[in-house]
Image: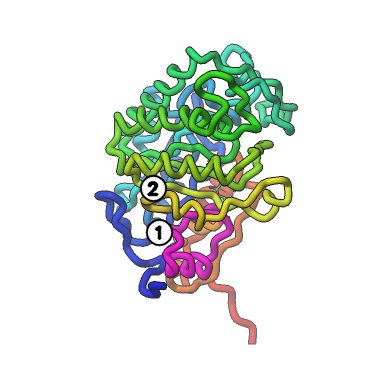
Amino acid sequence: MNNSINLFSPYQLGDLELPNRIVMAPLTRQRAGQGNVPRELNATHYAQRASAGLIIAEATQVSPQGQGYPNTPGIHSPEQVAGWKLVTDAVHQQGGRIFLQLWHVGRISHPDLQPNGELPIAPSAIKPEGQALTFAGLKPFVTPRALETTEIPVIVEQYRQAAANALAAGFDGVEIHAANGYLIDQFLRDGTNQRTDEYGGSIENRVRFLREIVEAVTSVWDSKRVGVRLSPSGTFNDMRDSNPLETFGYTAQVLSQFDLAYLHLIESADADIRHGGTAVPTDYLRERYTGTLIVCGGYTAEKGNAVLANQQADLIAFGTLFIANPDLPRRLALNAPLNQPIPESFYGGGEKGYTDYPFWSPANEPAVSL
Ligand SMILES: Cc1cc2nc3c(=O)[nH]c(=O)nc-3n(C[C@H](O)[C@H](O)[C@H](O)COP(=O)(O)O)c2cc1C
């Protein structure tokens, strides 16, 4: 127990000095402009949140095929790189640090969102339960097309190129999105990966796709500027695995070999576990991953401080609280009241619910009735 470490202790993340241990979790907000290009509106949103120790910008598709929802940003065209430069410049001007989350949704898409109306791709042709969000509203998921073995290096190369584009756009690092039932997670878990080639079967084979992506991305970036996000206990996007402790324990050990910036874990809400997930305790992964650990999922200041003091993790990521509180570190430091997140404006739209949550000031405090 080390009581001196809390959310406001600085942290040395590789060569980056974080002024506090409060991370802004990646948050899809579906507010990119024409061509899935980030714009001033997005720059304002992120610059408002620059007091985070680290911002992890929203999931961003590495290719047109990687898209699964309307108006999510990409990092595969020159216009998108220029758009993201507005964002990184604005955050840096405010003294912040920002990573980009690299994303391919795999089967969590729909022909309506795919180039030429093609089928989404996946490790295996297994249809997820549920509905895709298209431009015309919700539509049932379709059975994806299983990737040919020879197509896999093409996707790995898209991650490498996207990482190079993120570097050109002025990011401080990248996070590989291997969580929440998207493409990399679909390879990791045997509920979605029933391949018989070297990318399926044993856990060594199922982790190969992630390993190759980490190798590709760290050929562009210093490994200390690359993080990976996993959701070992999550069932979101109809995910399952026959042995999550083995799958994610082994994955954590493989990732330890790369001297990365961090491993970022989503600790699932009870709801996920009730729906058939198996809890993979963070302590179990802490024993198997030797580097910096970020945890996320339902944290309050009190819970975050306790986890840091016990050294169960090094950094705490906040999602919904950062949506509603641009100055979250200051509010937590002052124990000031928090704005409540408004779920109706999470996805899509403009300034409302995006750049108009107020900063705290004594004048904003509700009057005390005597
Ligand atoms: C609106 C919204 C968008 C999200 N988008 C992403 C995303 O792009 N990438 C990701 O890995 N997780 C995403 N998540 C999950 C969050 O990063 C985080 O893990 C989750 O909100 C739990 O943390 P919290 O309890 O502090 O909100 C999203 C969550 C919400 C509510």
Residue 93 picture location, percent across and down: 30, 49
Q: Residues within 10 Å of mark 1 (few under 14, many from 20)?
A: many
Under circle 2, the secondary element is strand
In the picture shown, does residue 191 fall above or below 299? above
> Visible in this render: residue 27?
yes
What is the magenta range? 295-320
> Could you tell me residue 349's position as x and y percent?
59, 40
Does residue 258 appear to the left or right of 194 in the view shown?
Answer: left
Residue count near mark 2 (Cα–Cα under 10 Å), binned few <14, some 14–19, many ≥20: many
Residue type of the residue flagged with mark 2: Tyr
Which sits in the foreground, 220 or 351?
Answer: 220
Q: Quadrant of residue 6?
A: bottom left
Identify residue type, mark 1: Asp
Does 299 appear in magenta? yes
Pick the front one: 9 or 340: 9
Which residue position holds label 2? 262
Picture quarter with the C terminus: bottom right
Residue labelled 2 has its Cβ within 8 Å of some atom of ligand 1: no
348 lies left or right of 259: right
Looking at the image, the residue that sits furthest to the bottom is 370
Residue 41 spot, x, y in % from top left: 46, 41
At a point 59% along the width and 29% down the height, the residue shown is 68
Earlier along the polypeptide chain: callout 2 or callout 1? 2
Q: From the viewer's perspective, is residue 164 above or below residue 278?
A: above
Front residue of this view, candidates 316 and 309: 309
Residue drawn at x 39%, y 47% is: 262
Q: Are marks 2 and 1 in contact (CB under 8 Å)?
A: yes
